[in-house]
Structures are given as structure tokens and as C-alpha cells.
Image: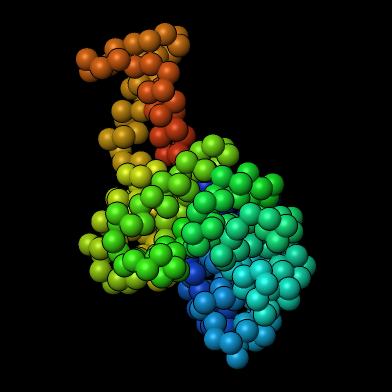
Amino acid sequence: MSRSPSVMTERVRHALSFLFVPGDRPARFSRATASGADVVVLDLEDGVGPDAKETARRLVADHLGQGLLAAVRVNPPGTQGHEADARMCAAYGAVVMVPKAVAGPALAALAQFGVIALVETAQGVLEAPTIARTPGVLRLALGHLDLAAELGVDNDHRPAIDPSRTALVLASAAAGLSGPVDGVTTAIRDRAVLTDDLAHARGLGMTGKLCIHPDQVEPSRTALRPSPEQVAWGRRVLDASRDGAVAVLDDRMVDRPVVERARRIVRSATDTTPTSKGQS
């Protein structure tokens, strides 16, 4: 049984947390689903060894066939296994995460049920505006580990990676997409590192996080939600500008850009998009 793609596409558009699970580890599927992650990503690419690809594809198909919600990270276009992955996703109407995403026909061909474009090459960063405007692309995500390797820089060196983060933020905004999804934090159990990474990414305009362990999910969701203080400020701004005129609040001018920011904050705080937890 497959689910209506619209359920998952809306989830992806508003998701704060994306949790990877290796496609050949079915025992972890239920834990991932129960983690509270907004989107579980069943991985057929980096998380699966070459000899386990076919087994993983079959196990993921079984999971999707039960009607359970998940996205699928396929093998990159042009590599072994990609065509079989794409056919399986199409059969179940699964949202596809496309690694090494670049603009062009290969990306467009996967967009029938929605695409998360994982940008992790220099070419992908430079083509981010075109990728974001490709029909069917729901969200941009940053694969900074592969990108750093291509650039020859340390993946934790923010001055080297931040221009790519900003490029994805600008491309997403120009295309009318939600803010992009930041790359993984490899320090799985170091809460302080994760918290710092989240604050940094959010400060640049990123609004989601790729997670590699269930323990990263709730901290990510908490950090990426507007704080109670921000929500209270947003509501005060909206109250002060109900007639649409320029107002003054706390000795600061409130004009249209300020009102729009306040509206986005309040809207995101009241978003009722369900998480993966408890869904079947």
C-alpha cells in the first residue's frame, strides 16, 4: 500500500529534522519512525555497502509497501543502482533525496513525487538557483562532507563552507522554497557541538538539519523552532501593525519587512505538520 505523495511533500516542505537510516538495517526503521523526526530518510547510498544494495532496495520497498511514510536517498544519477532505485521509488510514490544534485534532465526526471536535492558538489552549489526552480524540487539540502572533500578543505571550517550555505539560502528564497537543510553533525553524542552547529546554521537562514542518530532529532527540532521570546515578539509586531501602517514598537520602527519576518515566525511556531512519530 502506498501513501498519497501530497502527505509527504508537505511534510518535507516544513520539516525541521531529517533522520538517515541505512536501508539494509530494517531493525532500525521502527526506532527511526518513533524518534520524532519530521522525515525519516531510508538510505540506499552511502549508508549501504556495495554488496548490500539490492537487499536494501528490497527492504525499503517492503517498508514503503506497508504504507509507512519515509523519503528515500537513492544512488546518484549515472551510478550503478540508480535506475532500479528510481523505479522502486516511483512504484510507491516516494519522495526522493537525490545525492550529488545538479541541474538537468536527471534531476527533473525524479521529480514526479517530489525531490530533496542534496547539493554536495561545487557544480551543485553554482547551479543552486536552477536546481531550486526545477519543478518538483521541494527543498535544498547541503552535503558539506562531500563538498569539503572536493574543495580540499576541513568540513568543520565554517569560513570555507559558509558561502555554500548562503548560496543555498539565497537560491531557496528566490525560488519560494523553505530554507535549506544543513548538513550532518558527525559528533554524534556531543550535544554542545550539535547545538553550536544548529545555532550557526539557523543564523545563516537554514531551517532544517540532517541527522545521523535519533539522539540528534529532538535537539534539532528544539533549536530550529522559534523561541517563546521570538514568538511573543512576532505577535506583538503583528498586533502593532494591524492597520498596515508603519508603527513604532519598543522605540523601533515596524515597517513591512519587519512585519513579514514576524509573520513567518508566528506561522512557523503554529505549524501543525505532524512528525514521523506514531505515523503508520
The mark tally for this picture is 0
Q: Position of residue 261 (x, y in %)?
A: 40, 29
Please name the colour scheme applied to the rendered image: rainbow
Q: Position of residue 40 (x, y in %)?
A: 53, 65
For this view, does 191 lie left or right of residue 254?
A: left
Q: Position of residue 117 (x, y in %)?
A: 57, 57
Vertical placement of 184 versus 137: above or below? below
* Along the line of sight, the residue nearer the viewer: 130 or 36: 130
Does residue 204 appear in the picture of this structure? Answer: yes
Residue at far bottom of view: 51
Query: Which quarter of the rendering shows the C terminus?
Result: bottom right
* Along the line of sight, the residue nearer the viewer: 235 or 130: 130
Residue found 44% across the figure and 64% down from its top:
147
For this view, does 36 lie left or right of residue 185?
A: right
- Residue 158 sits in quarter: bottom left
For this view, does 30 lie left or right of residue 261?
A: right
Does residue 88 appear in the picture of this structure? Answer: no
Residue found 29% across the figure and 61% down from its top:
157
- Residue 65 sits in quarter: bottom right
Residue found 47% across the figure and 41% down from its top:
170
* Along the line of sight, the residue nearer the viewer: 91 or 105: 105
Q: Position of residue 118 (x, y in %)?
A: 54, 60
Residue found 46% across the figure and 54% down from its top:
181
Query: Which quarter of the rendering shows the N terminus?
Result: bottom right
- Residue 110 sits in quarter: bottom right
